[in-house]
Amino acid sequence: MALKPEQGLLKILVCDDDPADRKLVRTYLRRITDREVVLLEAGEKEEIREALGRGRIDLVLMDVQMPEKSGMEWLEEIVEKELAPVVIMTGSGSEEVAVEALQGGAADYLPKARLWKDSEEKVVETIDGALERWRRTQQSKANLEQLERLANYDSLTGLYNRGAILRKLEEQINHARRYKKEFSLSLMDIDHFKKVNDQYGHLIGDEVLEKVAELVREDVRIADSVGRYGGEEFIAVLPKTQLSSAVIVAERIREIIEATEMTASEGKVFSVTVSQGLSGYRAGDDKDSLISRADEALYRAKETGRNRVETSA
């Protein structure tokens, strides 16, 4: 019986401090598989760490009794870092060890006695099963990440969508109430965006939205949250930022966007500007009151010439 061939090259790291056992595992695996297998062997702590750091590993066969750092401790680290599926090996065949390994995140458990017996089918099932469970787990995580992205991020700009940025704002309000911290909110709007769509088309308009979003995201801090509020409007939540400091941030963003060249499909270069309204958190504020004051400030910025930053009264 052979391991399933559909995945091509298989890199297996065998961790065992007993050279004889490693040789047994090596001989056995090469006998039962018709897949191309690359076997890496490690018996000491530094050898294991080096092997794990080299790159892709498809499967780890880990002896439970390892020097310096036990197999269970290695299991915890590998599972936490999501490096590869781990099959715990032991010479004792203890059910307690098997339960502990599986509860610790092992993909399966393999008594070494199976390698001495004529039990190719069981060993192949163990390895194939571990690989398949790992594949399903990783696919499930990828699917969950995709769903989370669809639920929280704007598909065009990659920024938080309206619902997500409002949740971020509520989280910041709760934090400010609890710890008596200041923060600021910026509501920004691309000036004359309808003219961009009318003159250059909606595809170019979408490119402008993407570019503006990229410029804002690159300029703010990691701790700041930026989202697409709707259409050509964006919100930036700026933690631990007084209104006076938020003005400096907003002016820098305004200047960067104004200085950035946009290109139409026929190669014509043009530029866009943004107007911004800022509000600072006050005791008793909720998201509606903060956004309302920022919106009033944004309206003044629009009314007094656009390409401006205004603060709430």
Image (cartoon, helix red, strand yellow):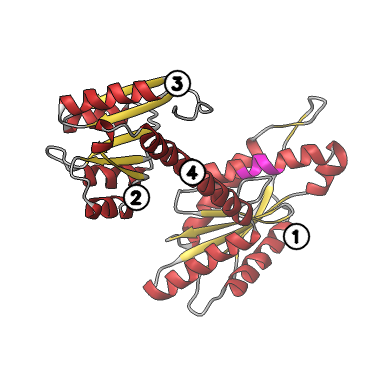
Q: What element carries label 3?
A: loop
Q: Which of 109 and 225 is in front in this view?
A: 109
> Which quarter of the rendered picture does the C terminus lie within?
bottom right
The residues bearing labels 4 and 2 have C-alpha atoms spaced at a distance of 13 Å
Task: Name the residue nearer the viewer: 106 or 113.
Answer: 113
Query: Is there CB contact under 8 Å for labels 4 and 2?
Result: no
> Which labelled disc corresponds to residue 34?
3
Which secondary structure, mark 1?
helix
Is residue 212 inside the magenta stretch? Answer: yes
Point out residue 3 in the picture as x, y percentages from the top left corner. 45, 29
Q: Give the range drawn in magenta.
A: 209-213
Earlier sequence position, callout 2 versus callout 1: 2
Check whether the beta carbons of the residues at disc 3 and disc 4 lie within 8 A of each other: no
Q: Is residue 246 left or right of residue 32?
A: right
**Mark 3 or 4: the one toward you:** 3
Is the residue 89 above or below the residue 248 in the image? Answer: above
* The disc label shown at residue 138, or none: 4
* In front: label 2 or label 1: 2
Query: Is mark 2 in CB contact (under 8 Å) with mark 3?
Result: no
Q: Marks 3 and 4, how far apart in space? A: 25 Å
Point out the tag, 4 or 2, that comes first from the N-terminus. 2
Checking the image for residue 303, the label placed there is 1
Q: Does the magenta stretch include residue 264?
A: no
